[in-house]
Amino acid sequence: MDRRCFTQWCTGAVLGPGLAGWAAALEDYPRTLLVHPDGAPLKAAEVSTREAMVFAYPLKGVPCYLINLGERSAATGPLASPDDGDYSNPQGVGPKGTLVAFVAICTHQLSYPTPAASYLRYAASGSELAGGPGRIVCCAHGSVYDPAHGAAPVSGPSQYPLLPVRLEHDAASDKLYATGALGRSFFERFFQNFKGELIERHGPGVYRQEVEGDAVTVPLSTYSRLVPAC
């Protein structure tokens, strides 16, 4: 983590003024099983460290990234959203606590993955923009986030983290579930900006429906036809 992100994480500067005490809990949403396209449960052992996997949660029009941090552990700490307030990012899950998930919408200007293209990606092995391995980069405007520290901003124009999704791991079956998230107000802003696209992709009103039961989860390279490197 570079000095900017380290300073924000350790001093709470990401939070902005007015933080009193520890952050609020994430909102509970329906417990949703992550599955392959054929309906088979996605196992924690199957999540690659090479790229993010995409699933919709907690609403059908909200894309999320599932990331395996590999040898890095996921730290928790106080963060903030200008739309949804102060919070603490959840811990990583899985056998090594290295699986994390975030809303895959850049908090700078709302770039997000679509079937046509994704300018937001997990650069597992690093890139020129990332400045190091294991960071989320937005090729649209150059924002960089660290998923091992709650997707806090590292560099670029974004001042706020990607929003968190809470995961649950069933150690007996190795299954993964999404159980909560932060971002209800942020989602509304996203919906207002991309209403036409979302209606075309999901149908009128469908993009606002909660995801229940299961959520198909695929690698980003499968979900988006074009994933630029930057």
Image: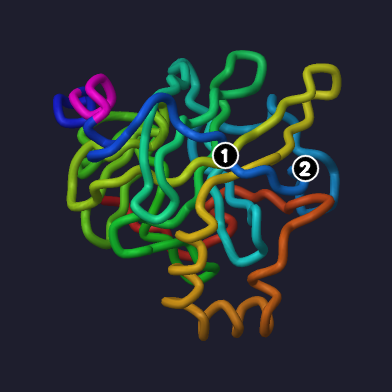
What's the residue type where badge 1 is placed? Answer: Leu
Q: Main secondary structure of the magenta part?
A: helix
The stretch of residues the image draws in magenta is 7-12
Q: Residue at x 65, y 42 (%)?
A: 180
User: What colour scheme does the image use?
Assistant: rainbow
Q: Which residue is mark 2?
A: 31
The residue lying toward the viewer, choosing from 199 and 18, is: 18
Q: Residue at x 43, y 20 (%)?
A: 75
Q: Residue at x 68, y 49 (%)?
A: 217
**Which quarter shows the N terminus?**
top left
Q: Earlier in the sequence, mark 1 or mark 2?
A: 1
Q: Eyeballing the image, is 137 above or below 110?
A: above
Secondary structure beneath dot 1 equals: loop
Q: Eyeballing the image, is 163 above or below 114?
A: above
**Residue 69 falls left or right of residue 141:** right
Q: Which residue is mark 1?
A: 26
**Residue 153 falls left or right of residue 103:** left
Secondary structure beneath dot 2 equals: strand
Q: Is residue 5 magenta?
A: no
Q: Write down the quadrant of residue 98 in the picture.
A: top right
What's the residue type where badge 2 is placed? Answer: Arg
Q: Residue at x 38, y 28 (%)?
A: 78
**Residue 130 falls left or right of residue 70:** left
Instruction: State the CA–CA distance, disc 1 to disc 2.
Output: 13 Å
The residue lying toward the viewer, choosing from 60 and 141, is: 60
Q: Eyeballing the image, is 25 above or below 139?
A: above
**Residue 10 falls left or right of residue 103:** left
